[in-house]
Image (cartoon, rainbow, N blue to C red):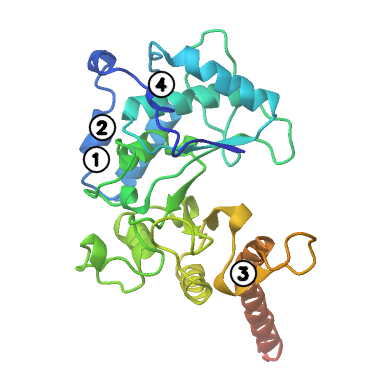
Amino acid sequence: MCMLGGAAQGSFKRLDYSDDELGLLPPLLSEAEAALNSNLNNDDESRTGNRRRNQHPVTLPAPTSFEQFYTPLRDFLRSRNLDGIDLDVEEPTSLPGIIHLIDRLRSDFGSSSSTSVPTPSDDPGSRSRSRSRSGGGFTITLAPVATALIKDLRHLSGFSYFSLERLRGASIDWYNTQFYNGWGNLDDSLPALGLEGWSFSDGLYDYIVRREGWKAEKVVVGMLTNPRHGGSGYVGWEGVTRVLGGLLERCPGFAGVSGWEYWMAAQEVDLVLSRDTPGREGEEVTPYWRWAWRMSWIFAVKEIRDRALVVAAGRSLAGLRIPTLT
């Protein structure tokens, strides 16, 4: 899997529509725009409409410069046999532009790793290609900042993630949500974001899931893995353990965690000095594998405890004497 965008400004501009082209597109997004003031899982009718729009998407024509810049990306994904892409949109991008890109990726690389999604294609000769790798499917994720999943708050992408989820949610596997650099803190940032009226004291993730209606299965917690990364928002090991442990309890199906960045991942206690590498005596090294081990440990403890509770309940039931009817 690879990432497109991030700090590489212009990546999505070159795949997007011009202002003139946007003015010529049909008003096919009006349903999603009108739904922005409602919760994502507002009612049965809303969810049914969401499924219908995802199952029968409207075909968008390609932007004028799209093929010139998309073709190298497509060929790169194929030549490396990659099984997915993370779209990190950190520049103004139109909603039709990101929808068209997702539709084209689905058309060229097949259905999601989690579901089968029919998608339109602007290339009459193209066909959906099923991946033959283990696990199957092609993964498409996005990487919004946390405020992008809260209505009326500023973020980086330019389009509405609420509209995108309503129109193409079935084509998106999950969101690698960034809880750092001033866009929301994993630990507790509700007052800083002007959300003091929120009745839950559990934090920003709970607000996104419970108040805004996002599914926990699709919202991955993105965090800083080293106190030297990013401008702000690093949470130490004790805080991460407490927050993730709570989310595992409160949010069944919790999607998991992602870290920026893995090759320098370390908690404060992991920063050690090298004594054995010739020429690097006394130099600080980063045992990044410990970060992944600790994340696995948090999830494993929850699973072990849950299984222990099942065993204990089973033993308790086994000791009951159930009278028989005669």
Would you identify the image quadrant in which residue 285 lies? bottom right
> What residue did someone put label 3 on?
271
Q: Earlier in the sequence, mark 3 or mark 2?
A: 2
Could you tell me which residue is drawn at 55 percent across and 72 percent down?
A: 268
Query: Is 277 above or below relative to 41?
Result: below
The kind of residue on which mark 2 rests is: Glu
Find residue 35 and name its label.
1
Residue 133 in picture, x, y percent from top left: 73, 35
How many dots with numbers? Answer: 4
4 left or right of 318 in image: left
Task: Kindly state the secondary structure of the residue where label 3 is placed.
Answer: loop
**Marks 3 and 2 in Cβ contact (< 8 Å):** no
Q: CA distance from mark 3 to mark 4?
A: 41 Å
Would you identify the image quadrant in which residue 34 lies? top left
> What residue did someone put label 2 on?
31
Residue 145 in picture, x, y percent from top left: 38, 49
Residue 101 in picture, x, y percent from top left: 45, 25
The kind of residue on which mark 4 rests is: Arg
The kind of residue on which mark 3 rests is: Leu
Q: Earlier in the sequence, mark 2 or mark 4?
A: 4
Q: CA distance from mark 1 to mark 3?
A: 48 Å
Find residue 14 and name its label.
4
Task: Kindly state the secondary structure of the residue where label 4 is placed.
Answer: helix
